[in-house]
Amino acid sequence: MSKVIFQIEGGSPVQIECNIGDNLLELARRANVAIDAPCSGNGSCGKCRVKLVEGELESLKSRHISDEEYTEGWRLSCSSKVVSDCTVFVPDIASAYQSRMKTADLSSPKEIAIFTEAQEALKKSGIAFTNGYRALELTMAEPSLDDTMPDNERLTRAITESSGAEKVEIPHTVMVRLAAVLRETGFHVCVKGLLKDGVFRCMDICPPEDRAIVGCAIDIGTTTVTMVLTDLETGSLLAKGSSGNGQIRYGADVINRIIEQGRPGGRKKLQDAIIKDTLTPIIANLCKSAGISARSILRLSVGANTTMNHLFVGVDAQSVRMEPYIPSFFHWEGLLAGDLKLPANPLAEVLIAPNIGSYVGGDITAGTLASGIWDKDELSLFIDLGTNGEIVFGNRDFLMSCACSAGPAFEGGDISCGMRATDGAVEACVVDKNTMEPTLTVVGDPGQKCVGICGSGIIDIISELFRCGIINAKGLFIREGERIRRDAHGMGRYVLATEQESETGREVSINEVDIDNFIRAKGAIFSAIITLLQSVDMTVDMIDHVYVAGGIGSGINMKNAVNIGMFPDVELEKFTYIGNSSLTGAYTMVMSDDAAAKTAEVAANMTYLELSTHPGYMDSFVAACFLPHTDSRLFPNSTQEM
């Protein structure tokens, strides 16, 4: 037996016993040490870097580790085996899932506007923003020898008089606390619960000053999880935050995670990664920020893709990726926070936005609701950019949907210097045609140096390199200069920040492999759009509006996205970036009973097109894997300067 000590940057050391020959990444997973592994350990992404401090590892050489770095002790954990007792340093790299848990500034009008605008738009469509959750402040006569009414009957009578309910239900979780709370408060209490169809179901009893009744809306993305807490009475936002999805250490895409959950004990590991390692810390952080108790969360709603929904509730997801691609559920009612051990009121309902197909899930249902295309006459295209690219086309008369496996490129995965849209991420770029010098916009405070590149930045960089004639249609470098470097094999890369210019002391660049990965991702999006349009015998010029969603930066430069052939070449005025529409939709669901019902109706009326079995999709995909496309007639406005 040997032992490995993981020295975690910014954290406490973790020690684990192991056998000689054990894989270091697998050991880290067993020890619950967070090491980012988007490729799930096949050695292709180079993100699972650790530094050998003491002892010995048997490590394969990798193109991701230079000779100098290898001499300094840097290794890929997925390609390293334990040879003896050793100590390894685990850096808190920008793309690691636990790094930079972020709480939003709700004093920002921009943060508030996203939700209020969606709420107002849905109200115009006849959606009432009401729900049955109530906080009742009650004062009861204290019992005496002359008044021997039991506590539950005393409470029932007070609730009936206050709410007008015909019947009152007091569940066990409330009953066991009833006597103590009544006597601690002198029979002056606040009772929280749900009034529905004349029945008031008690959910909590507490001191009268604790009147908060809170909803929690969650977007569970494959890469990023975002959440808001909202007042269920007023709809006002109480707190908002985000974090990386803890499941990313088991792979950046849903297929790798499905495979991992199919291994012994895998289903629990994946569920723990999202609930214990991701949602629980975010909820705790937001409750602290809002000054409330987690027991005040009386309702939760979740927008997530089909696989994330299965892993969240702990249901086997194998059937999602196996033909005929039938998931365990599309719609699920009756789920409670207590069933999943979520840090909320155990009786809180968990609303899951309905899935539509194996690869079009509740995040798209919620996003479609928020976009409003279901209530418009115009033909609209709704595109959600993430690890999977999901697309909806239609209007109030019909809705068609499909999904393509774009890979994690839009959220920084499969890109050597890729990262989420957090502090230090390059989110926009302009390149000077003559000097080839970049002008970067970096997420964070003024003066923030760059750490890596997020999705919107990647779009800009590739578009600018192509526009300036620095790369050709295949994504290969065809110009030379100070910013262009080549490795021993001649592979080119464009340097956005040198070692001296970056935050980490490591070069930030984009290479030909990165560009090729991104071209495949954008090709998947465009070919899916074309295939979806063809399925209803329509063309690009029939699109009236394009709604683009996805948290890949503060916004997408639509002109650049068209220039590289990711979006159809239509008038730029037709494009609208609507941000994280899944979270917006989840917010409307948690606030409004009507919105929750309408989301289910939208899902039921949507037709799902399975691209993997569609005869023309692969031909369209291959044709789209160039800048901008093999058929230049589709992109008359795309430019490349020479």
Image (cartoon, rainbow, N blue to C red):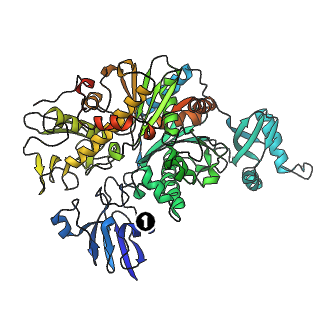
Q: Is residue 109 visible?
A: no
Q: Amino acid at mark 1?
A: Arg
The residue lying furthest to the top in this view is 377
Q: Is residue 30 visible?
A: yes
Please give left or right for residue 47 compared with residue 336 in the image.
left
Give residue 239's position: percent from left, percent from top: 48, 42
Q: Classify mark 1: residues with Cα within 10 Å, few (<14), some (14-19) or many (20+).
A: some
Classify the position of the N terminus by image quarter. bottom left
Query: Quarter-wise, where is residue 123 in the image?
Result: top right
Give residue 534's position: percent from left, percent from top: 41, 26
Query: Does 102 appear above or below 571?
Result: below
Nearer-the-camera pick, 372 or 209: 372
- Residue wearing tag 1: 29
Classify the position of the C terminus by image quarter. top left
Q: Residue at x 33, y 59 (%)?
A: 92
Nearer-the-camera pick, 231 or 53: 53
Query: Quarter-wise, where is residue 51 in the image?
Result: bottom left
Please give left or right for residue 621 compared with residue 121 in the image.
left
Q: Residue at x 52, y 27 (%)?
A: 119
Nearer-the-camera pick, 385 or 577: 385
- Secondary structure, mark 1, is helix
